[in-house]
Amino acid sequence: MKRERSKPSKLKPAPIQNVFYEVEFVPGLEPFVLEELHEKLVNLEEIYPYVKSGNFQFNFYGDPRQLLKLRSVGSAFVVKLFEVPRPLALLGHQNFSQLLTLIESVLSLHPEGSFKTFRISAAGSDSPVFRRIYKELELSTGLIPSQDGDLFLRVRKPIVRGDGFEVSIRLTPRPLSVRPWRVCDFPGAINSTVAYVMARLSEPSAGDVIVNLGCGSGTILIERLEMLPAKAVVGVDIDPEALACARRNVYAAGLTGKVDLLRGDMRSTGLNSGFADVIYADLPFGHILGSHADNIHLYPDTLKESARIAREGARGIFITSEIRLMRKVIDLCKHLWRQEGEVRLEMDKLRLMIFVLSRL
Ligand SMILES: C[S@@+](CC[C@H](N)C(=O)[O-])C[C@H]1O[C@@H](n2cnc3c(N)ncnc32)[C@H](O)[C@@H]1O
């Protein structure tokens, strides 16, 4: 537990009880998160009944490193319920010792030095009590308090069960949704966990020929290729800066040579007809990119162009917050595309919809 700057702690680790796990995700992704939890976590036990949008708590007795592989969740936490009447009691000998053991269990998941700073999120986190907790943690761990802390602790009333206070500790220095390959950020880039779900919705196969219209910084293509190889992958965007950004991310992901990034207009790509098995489009919407007035023309033109380059039976996975417009356009194009499903999401108070289509 002790780090370089730390004074020796007199506290001995104690066995910890009442420990479980928690994942946070974009509300609306519940079924995909459940599927991934069952798929990737060996020894997953009870998942507590869902009480809070975008959040699951569950018992899990396997190696917590398995949680670091989750792609549909924003963050994963280990949680301990302390049956104490108020946060001050966390400083009691036994409780504090257990808190340190919990912290050590997170630090030990990563190479030495991965965490340098810490922060606590709690109601009243600037109160004298929390100032003491900060001080004790700094002394015992050697980590430095910082607003952007690598080690992120949350203290709050239990959200599912029990009385007292839950201490949750994020298992990673950065959220899981911040992918290591993202070296170039881009305004309007899609959340990587949502891109992962779009890739899943396309029922990927290693023989897929893929086109991503409006590929921006390449998020969807990279998430798709990290899931499974593909036969051919083309990203199209009108903005050279977006393409330059995508190139850097594709390189960082080790996928250079596996993706063709082309400058072009999604309404008229110049690509061959009938060759694509999957078309992804993160359509321009909202305040950052494009305008509703532009989209009224852009969306139908893009759906028609997508239909032209798609083979019969191809999947079309489109995401937008222009839900009403997209419904109208799908209806207009019902001779080209059949809607197979939809996934409603909520992100930063914005409603989004993933439309799952198949080419007739
Ligand atoms: C919502 S952003 C996509 C973001 C991308 N998924 C990412 O993660 O970075 C929409 C993209 O569509 C592109 N775009 C807008 N109009 C276009 C058009 N007519 N043809 C091709 N691309 C276009 C924008 O340059 C932008 O990169």
Image: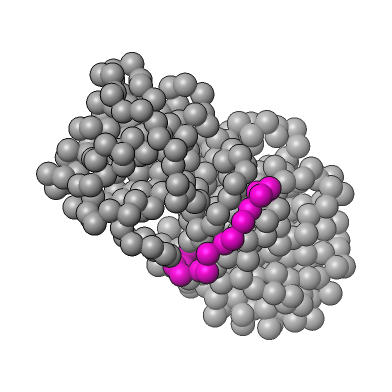
Nearer to the camera, 259 or 80: 80
User: What is the span of residues highlighted in magenta in the rendered image?
Assistant: 40-54
What is the x, y in percent for residue 334?
75, 81
Q: Is residue 227 visible?
A: yes
Query: Magenta region, mostly helix, strand or loop?
Result: loop
**Picture quadrant of residue 315:** bottom right
Q: How is the image coloured?
A: one colour
Q: Is residue 106 left or right of residue 209?
A: left
- Is residue 43 in the magenta section? yes
Q: Is residue 34 left or right of residue 271?
A: left
What is the x, y in percent for residue 51?
46, 70
Q: Residue at x 59, y 60 (%)?
A: 46
Q: Residue at x 66, y 43 (%)?
A: 222
Q: Exactly how many numbered labels are in the figure?
A: 0
- The single residue placed furthest to the top in the displayed view is 4
What is the x, y in percent for residue 354?
61, 67
What is the x, y in percent for residue 37?
63, 54
Q: Quadrant of the C terminus?
A: bottom right
Nearer to the camera, 117 or 251: 117
Q: Is residue 246 visible?
A: no
Q: Residue at x 32, y 54 (%)?
A: 83
**Picture quadrant of residue 170:** top left
- The single residue placed furthest to the left in the displayed view is 128
Q: Residue at x 20, y 32 (%)?
A: 135
- Is residue 355 in the magenta section? no
Image vertical order of residue 250 relative to residue 283, above or below: above
Q: Quadrant of the N terminus?
A: top left
Nearer to the camera, 177 or 103: 103
